[in-house]
Amino acid sequence: MFNASPTTAARPLSTRVTTEITDHVAVVTLARPKKMNALDMDMFRAVRDAALALRENADVRCVVVHGEGRAFCAGLDVKSVMSPLDASANTAELLERKDGAVANLAQEVSYLWRTVPCPVIAAVHGVCIGGGFQIALGADVRVAAAETKFSVMEAKWGLIPDMGATLALRELVPRDVAIELTTTGRIFRAEEAKALGLVTRVVPDGEHLASALATAKQIAAGSPDAAAAAKRLWHAAYDAPTDASADRRMLLLETELQKRLMGGWNQLACTVRGLGAPPALQPGFYARDDAWSQEADDEAEKRVAALLDGVDFDEPARAEAA
């Protein structure tokens, strides 16, 4: 659907999280400031629901996640989640995985941001520890205020990080760094986080949200299909093993994604702009195409697998048409 003019929408998914969409940029706010946005059960559910809603919104071209008040997120609200009367039920809800599901609820607050078909930026400040750090790691880009404190805090409770950090840490840091951070639970600041590869950009205190929004607006000014394809491509590339068969798979996927983009309205709109057409003659972008839905991604994976196996993926469809 073509948007002729900017739209603004604000909708609280619960008292814990709000989502506001302006000019194709969604701002997701963790809104439990009195508790430094610590994760109780309502917060877990609300973060999950925000990600799921944005995953289905084709008008959104970039997402910024940030925390209200003094912190991004102080991690698990242990007193609430592990209260004697509710601990058993809460643990079951957090850790049990529905049949066929990739992640459980504890993991979804981080993992689902990877599945939103547009770039997601975490703008962090204050403290970003434990489960809060893992939410930030689920984003594609992390902008941190200089004095932000980070920690893989689970070691303090005799636990391991189990909210999706396994995926992000293996992509961002060497094994020894992951082990050291996970076993010590030590606190470190934004500059060290950037040096380790855990943060994309460090900005002066108080500028994290403005910096993230500036990047988001730059992304939203481009083709939503190209942004979705770029995210799909690089997640697949970093997830792939490093061997000859994986190289072939990634090169095939790169071609399949490019075929999806070429000739589409948004790609043609970029071409017209790139050729220097006057602003009055430059077409606007349509909403993100259905080609970047989860179903389409699954079909692309099947097509790549078929090509690797030497099978003509389109042959059954051609035979049926004949």
Image (cartoon, rainbow, N blue to C red):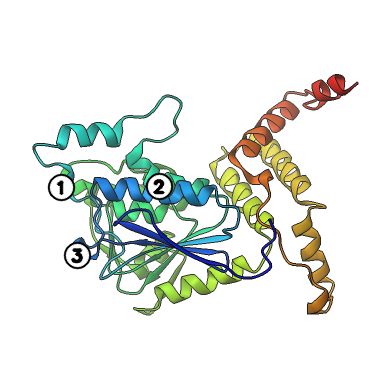
- Residue 174 on image: x %, y %: 42, 50
* Whether label 2 touches label 1, CB < 8 Å: no
Residue closer to the observer: 151 or 292: 292
**Image side of residue 37 versus residue 291, left or right:** left
- Residue 48 on image: x %, y %: 39, 46
Q: Nearer the viewer, mark 2 or mark 1?
A: 2
* Residue underneath mark 1: 80
Up/down of 161 relative to 98, above or below: below
What residue lies at 73% left-to-right and 67% top-to-bottom?
Answer: 284
Mark 3, Cα crowd under 10 Å, few <14 / some 14-19 / many 20+, is: few
- Residue 5 on image: x %, y %: 65, 70
- For mark 3, give the secondary structure: helix
State the separation of the CA atoms marked 1 and 3. 14 Å
- Counting residues from the N terminus, which is met first, the one under dot 3 or under dot 2? 3
- Counting residues from the N terminus, which is met first, the one under dot 1 or under dot 3? 3
- Residue 318 on image: x %, y %: 86, 24
Instruction: Name the amino acid type tagged 3.
Output: Lys
What residue lies at 42% left-to-right and 24% top-to-bottom?
Answer: 99
- For mark 1, give the secondary structure: helix
Instruction: Name the amino acid type tagged 1.
Output: Ser
Query: Which disc, if any, is residue 221?
Result: none
* Residue underneath mark 3: 34
Q: Is residue 320 visible?
A: yes
Q: Is residue 170 visible?
A: no
Residue closer to the observer: 111 or 265: 265
* Residue underneath mark 2: 49
